[in-house]
């Protein structure tokens, strides 16, 4: 058995059953080995940013890593922006980056580059496998690293001769370690703060934002009068009717300062003290009041649900009912297409157990409130700020959860970075309804131009923020990649086309003209 097959068998044996791939010559033995090994689903992405974003979506929905297959330094470089996003979301993934055969590297052939240096900033674990006999053991170590709580990026560089020479056969992967309990001192400190009666916020991210963690956090806040919020963006939040709802720290600095003003304590449940996305002249970087103290209940890799349960116990909140959302679902909105109307119709239309991928940027900023009482769903956000994640993330989430509907909320500017994901959705028959909010501009940047104090923009500056001239035909783009769709110019059309997409099995795209 050659090295490549030893590696693929190690991946499958270690529970890595999906590989998002964009291969080249140096990965041909890995590709050939896929045919000889059962249990590995291979999904082709036509740009590496699709591959890495999909692996992120897959991890968020399964809590287990997928593999990616990337072609040398440039293949990795194309994947890097969404690996950055995955890293910020603490998603685990096993990147397999092909390289030239070990003896060929010294000749500096066109695709030669320093792959280790390229991958290091966004990888917790990096290794170039030295020979075919060690590739399976290195693969097993990469899987173990990717599964390290809360999830890590592991990058294994695979020189072509380590794939084609005789290998060791598969190597067993040690079972994943559970999360460690949070230190008792943090729980005691948090309980003391909550008992003090001073204005306190429980700030959540990570594992705490699933239904069980939210119920405990809701009980604690109902009992003690503390406030409850989530970080500005989060990997996966479970929300909707029957669950404890929470708002996020706003993106706009002045709004965030207002929301957090008066607080004396923030209890951090996996979260960091809130910081502004960017610095702006004459505005603070830290969003909490100067005299507000942070208290770590648990770190991101620790057992957040266990820590919340212990805190609920400590403040006597176990018998307090969790304040879950009981409101009726909103009605469909009608008339002119506007962000709040879209949020309302979305709240009415979201199917039970949907997975919402949110890269709606300006249009979607207010969607949390009107979707609060929608059917129960999971909400996935971009945590690394590198746009072009939404369509790939939705693709990976749909591969992970074939029984659930994925609804991708996408800005037209962000969508254009990685639109090839639509082709993968069509080829794989993935159940994704994509709503592209076609405001034909980089709308958010128009506000940012003013916020950074760059003065009154002229024609040249405004042209850099405008996506019209020519208008992008999203329905045409989708059709060309095998995804049916329709355009909506009124809320009535939106309601109809969105419902059509949600009713159809497989991918569908609605271009929403704002
Ligand atoms: C990789 C990357 N390049 C550029 C940016 C800067 N950027 C932030 S938002 C944005 C435009 C987003 O446009 P769109 O998705 O249409 O959202 P809108 O604000 O119009 O709703 C750009 C270019 C970024 N965040 N990431």
Image: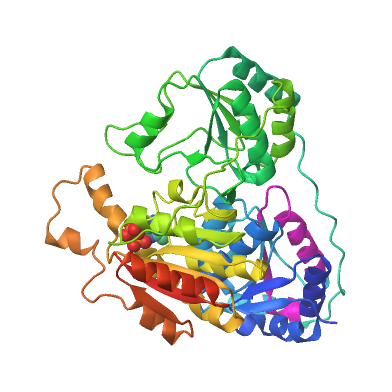
Q: Is residue 412 visible?
A: no
| x and y percentages locating residue 387 in the rendered image | 43, 60
Q: Check residue 110 for magenta coloring.
A: no
Position above or below: 189 against 247 = above
Residue at horizontal 69 percent and vertical 60 percent from the top: 62
| Residue lying at 71% horizontally and 21% vertically, measured from the top left | 316
Residue 223 pos. (x, y %): 63, 23
**Residue 18, picture quadrant:** bottom right
* Residue lying farthest to the top in this orientation: 196
- Is any atom of residue 5 visible in this view? yes
Task: Give the quadrant of the C terminus.
Answer: bottom left
> Which of these two is toward me, 114 or 235?
235
Left or right: 187 in relation to 202? right
Query: In the rendering, at what x and y percent does residue 412 appear?
Result: 36, 67
Q: Residue at x 76, y 86 (%)?
A: 35
Q: Residue at x 47, y 55 (%)?
A: 347
Question: Where is 294 relative to 510, above or below?
Answer: above
In the rendered structure, the answer to whether residue 214 lies left or right of residue 85 reads right
Which portion, as a residue range, is magenta?
134-163
User: The N terminus is located in which quarter?
Assistant: bottom right
Task: Classify residue 496 by image quadrant.
Answer: bottom left
Tell which quarter ligand 1 is in: bottom left
**Quadrant position of residue 185:** top right
Residue 191 in percent (x, y) is at 66, 20
């Amino acid at each position: 058995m050659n090295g490549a097959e030893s590696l693929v068998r190690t991946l499958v044996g270690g529970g890595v059953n999906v590989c998002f791939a964009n291969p080249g010559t140096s990965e041909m033995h890995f590709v050939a080995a896929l045919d000889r090994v059962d249990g590995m689903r291979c999904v082709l992405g036509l740009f590496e940013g699709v591959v890495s974003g999909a692996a992120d979506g897959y991890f968020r929905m399964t809590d287990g890593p997928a593999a990616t297959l990337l072609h040398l330094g440039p293949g990795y470089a194309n994947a890097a922006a969404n690996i950055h996003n995955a890293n910020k979301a603490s998603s685990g993934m096993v990147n397999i980056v092909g390289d030239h055969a070990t003896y060929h590297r010294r000749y500096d052939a066109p695709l030669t580059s320093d792959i280790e240096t390229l991958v290091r900033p966004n990888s917790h674990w990096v290794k170039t496998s030295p020979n075919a006999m060690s590739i399976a053991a290195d693969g097993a170590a990469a899987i173990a690293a990717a599964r390290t709580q809360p999830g890590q990026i592991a990058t294994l560089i695979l020189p072509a001769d380590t794939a084609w020479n005789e290998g060791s056969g598969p190597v067993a992967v040690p079972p994943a370690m559970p999360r460690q309990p949070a230190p008792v001192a943090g729980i005691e400190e948090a309980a003391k703060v909550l008992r003090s009666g001073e204005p306190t916020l429980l700030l959540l991210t990570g594992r705490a934002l699933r239904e069980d963690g939210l119920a405990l956090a809701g009980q604690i806040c109902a009992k003690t009068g503390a406030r409850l919020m989530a970080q500005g963006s989060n990997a996966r939040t479970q929300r909707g009717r029957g669950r404890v709802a929470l708002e996020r720290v706003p993106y706009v600095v002045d709004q965030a300062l207002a929301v957090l003003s008066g607080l004396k304590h923030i209890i951090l449940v996996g979260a960091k003290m809130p910081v502004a996305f960017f610095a702006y002249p004459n505005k603070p970087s830290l969003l909490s009041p100067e005299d507000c103290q942070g208290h770590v209940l648990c770190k991101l890799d620790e057992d957040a649900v266990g820590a919340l349960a212990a805190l609920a116990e400590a403040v006597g909140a176990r018998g307090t009912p969790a304040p879950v959302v009981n409101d009726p679902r909103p009605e469909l909105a009608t008339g002119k297409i506007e962000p709040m109307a879209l949020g309302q119709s979305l709240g009415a239309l979201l199917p039970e157990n949907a997975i919402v991928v949110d890269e709606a940027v300006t249009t979607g900023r207010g969607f949390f409130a009107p979707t609060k009482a929608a059917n129960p769903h999971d909400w996935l956000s971009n945590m690394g700020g590198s746009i072009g994640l939404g369509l790939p993330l939705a693709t990976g989430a749909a591969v992970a959860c074939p029984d659930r509907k994925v609804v991708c909320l996408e800005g037209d500017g962000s969508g254009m970075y990685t639109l090839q994901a639509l082709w993968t959705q069509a080829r794989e028959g993935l159940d994704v309804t994509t709503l592209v909010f076609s405001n034909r501009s980089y709308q958010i940047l128009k506000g940012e131009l003013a916020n950074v104090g760059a003065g009154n923009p002229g024609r040249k500056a405004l042209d850099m923020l405008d996506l019209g001239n020519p208008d992008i035909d999203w329905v045409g783009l989708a059709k060309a990649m095998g995804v049916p769709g329709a355009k909506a110019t009124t809320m009535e059309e939106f309601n109809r086309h969105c419902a059509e997409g949600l009713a159809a099995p497989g991918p569908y795209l609605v271009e929403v003209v704002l």
